[in-house]
Image (cartoon, rainbow, N blue to C red):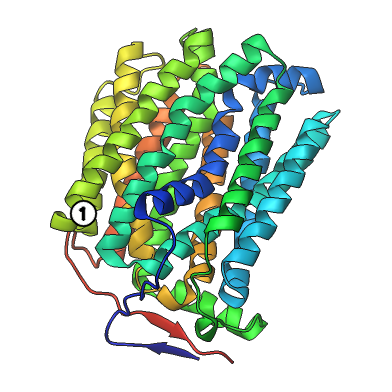
Amino acid sequence: MLVKSADAAQPQAPRFPLSTPEFVTLIALLTALTALSIDIMLPALPKIASALGATTDNEQQLVLSVYFAGFAVGQFLFGPLSDSYGRRNPLLFGLALYTIGTVLAVTATSFAMLLFARAFQGFGAAAPRIVAIAVVRDRFAGREMARIMSFVTMVFVIVPILAPTLGEAIVQFSDWHIIFWVLLGMGLLATLWSGVRLPETFHQSDRLPFTARNIWAACAAVATTRQTAGYAVALGFSFGLLFSYIITSQQIFVDVYGLGAEFPIAFGLIAAFLAAASIINAKLVRRVGMRGVSHRAILGGLAVCGVMAAFGFPDKPPLWAFGTFMAAVFLCFGLMSANFNSLAMEPMGHIAGTASSLIGFYTTVAAAALGTIVGQSFDGSVRPLCIGISVMFAATLATVLVTERGRLMKHCDAPDVKVRAA
């Protein structure tokens, strides 16, 4: 049975052993495992595919796509588990699965075995991603949650800046298997840090029995709450443009622009604009609000795409022009994503785990599907990526307009949705 209260319940922060910097850093590590597991692989994809018998260049993208698929399925499970059994146990269980998947990847002797290991790895990585967001929602709400998530993102974006460079160094001076040993070390660090320092943040009295009826009620709450469902769909489109870039970036910078060993530098420079977006968002969100920041970012992204469209989406614009385009896209994406996620989670305080999992599941499936479509459309030029990004910005705007009933940058308090145990 669903009950909507008139006032949004603010989570009550218990006495907490972690300082804000340590809390932000740990949450960033948990959410960054997936980014690390993707970005560190990019320079190594051709060697991995060649060593394990992949037959086509585009087939190497499956190393990323199957990870996203496992990640999506895992999110669907770990959210309800964390609403029923608390945050810690599902988190530690998922990290254990991630570790096992990483060991399987290290020992893979065929491309099919590696794909299985990557899917397993992605399944386990869903737990830290889902639980981390639920823990933040347990302790914060509204603009304060958006501000904390901006700080998390600031730490998080160090990963896409440094990971490709680390991956390139490993490929140049050692064996690609070392990449998975690095991932194994990060997984063990996350497990030990969480196990020793992170307390339980979800009170026993708020937990829902793990029953089909309660899970269905929570799913219905997510799907029928206009703000949550609408911004989840918008988040899917916005992550779709990110995944499209990640999946095709190695081929674009190496095959189209011939950067070779300089690819990680270009990738990192563009990713740095995510950090800039996080800093800007943390400063603006308290004053302008989540809608004010994110809605302006959508319009900015469309304007940038309009410039590219005015030149007819060229096959190979100058590297500086393409880099500037992607930097602007990343800046707008960074201003959208943290706020979209916070807006979607705002009414979901009492089912934060399930809501986070459903939002994450949809977002990952949608983004992986969109990214795969764009990736498989790669034809030796940047045109498919630029057109795909433009379409996804337009779809994001349309979704937000429907969600906000045709009005942008309008504040509206969302009631907290509660699910009573059946």
Q: Position of 72 compared to 252: left or right?
A: right
Q: Regarding mark 1 in the picture, which secondary structure is present there? A: helix
Question: Where's residue 37, x and y in %?
Answer: 60, 36
Kindly identify the residue that appears in the image at 33 percent across and 11 percent down.
318
- Relative to 45, residue 7 above or below: below
Q: How many marks?
A: 1
Residue ranking furthest to the right: 109
Question: Where's residue 50, x and y in %?
Answer: 75, 17
As rendered, which of 384 and 81 lies closer to the eye? 81
Quarter of the image for residue 300 reads top left
Instruction: Give the residue type that dot 1 points to.
Output: Val
Question: Where's residue 201, x and y in %?
Answer: 48, 70
Q: Position of 31 compared to 152: left or right?
A: right
Which residue, given by chain and number where applicable, does mark 1 sit on? 285
Kindly identify the residue that appears in the image at 80 percent across and 29 percent down.
111
- Quarter of the image with the C terminus in it: bottom right
